[in-house]
Amino acid sequence: QKEVEQDPGPLSVPEGAIVSLNCTYSNSAFQYFMWYRQYSRKGPELLMYTYSSGNKEDGRFTAQVDKSSKYISLFIRDSQPSDSATYLCAMKGNSGAGSYQLTFGKGTKLSVIP
Amino acid sequence: NAGVTQTPKFQVLKTGQSMTLQCAQDMNHEYMSWYRQDPGMGLRLIHYSVGAGITDQGEVPNGYNVSRSTTEDFPLRLLSAAPSQTSVYFCASSPGTGGFTQYFGPGTRLTVL
């Protein structure tokens, strides 16, 4: 079992919809949780990060972490065609060798249809 | 600032050839890393560095070498290219040593025939 599981999609939604993207993980040492966005043929860019459990909001984006369930989510409100991209979750620990390495999910490809 | 730059953008090699993928950053970041991205596999860490003179292996280091002689540069060397190394390679840098918030380059698309 891979340490981080993410449904690759593709996920297609109409403009204005609420999008929910999710990852599960098995390594209880993960403490930092990140979401990256990757447009086609570009490098990933950091969207949001959270430390440990809880929620974090930034504009139309909300990240949630439930460490008890080993489950993280990214919600996109009022989705726009410009949100069409692949979304990658990433995680890392905060001690030992794991504190220097990000583990990525495979990414979910999202299309927002006008 | 140019951020993270990678050269070349595209490369075709024959099996057994060697080459170096270049990566440079102008943000004075301590942490730099190399990933490969393959369909259905996501991003996988090859090697990383927490500062000049310090490198370590990631998840898939076999067939690759790195060195970090300066803060700015982190080249990735393919010793003897194999078709299994056909991939898109991304270099990234991050302030501090934790690799927490990484800034990625535009990538190098490598094909090994």
Image (cartoon, rainbow, N blue to C red):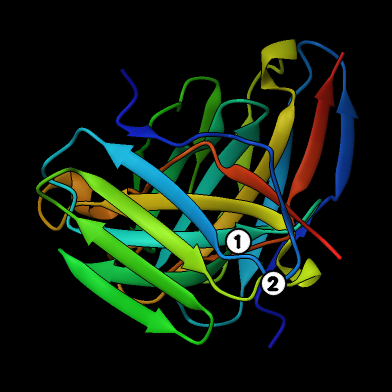
Q: Is residue A10 above or below residue A64?
A: above
**Pointer 1 and pointer 2: residues touching (CB < 8 Å)?**
no
How far across and how far down the image is residue B97, in percent? 29, 67
How far across and how far down the image is residue A97, in percent? 18, 45
Kind of residue at badge 1? Arg
Between B58 and B18, the one nearer to me in the picture:
B58
How far across and how far down the image is residue A103, in percent? 37, 43
Give the chain of mark 2: A
Q: Residue at x 27, y 37 (%)?
A: A25
Q: Identify the element where label 2 is drawn.
A: loop
Q: Quadrant of the C terminus of chain A?
A: bottom right
Q: Residue at x 67, y 62 (%)?
A: B105
Q: Which mark is residue A16?
A: 2
Q: Identify the element where label 1 is drawn.
A: strand
Say if residue B53 shows up in the picture.
Answer: no
Kind of residue at badge 2? Gly
Between B1 and A53, the one nearer to me in the picture:
A53
For mark 1, what is the residue?
A: A37
On the picture, is A75 further left or further right than A65?
A: right
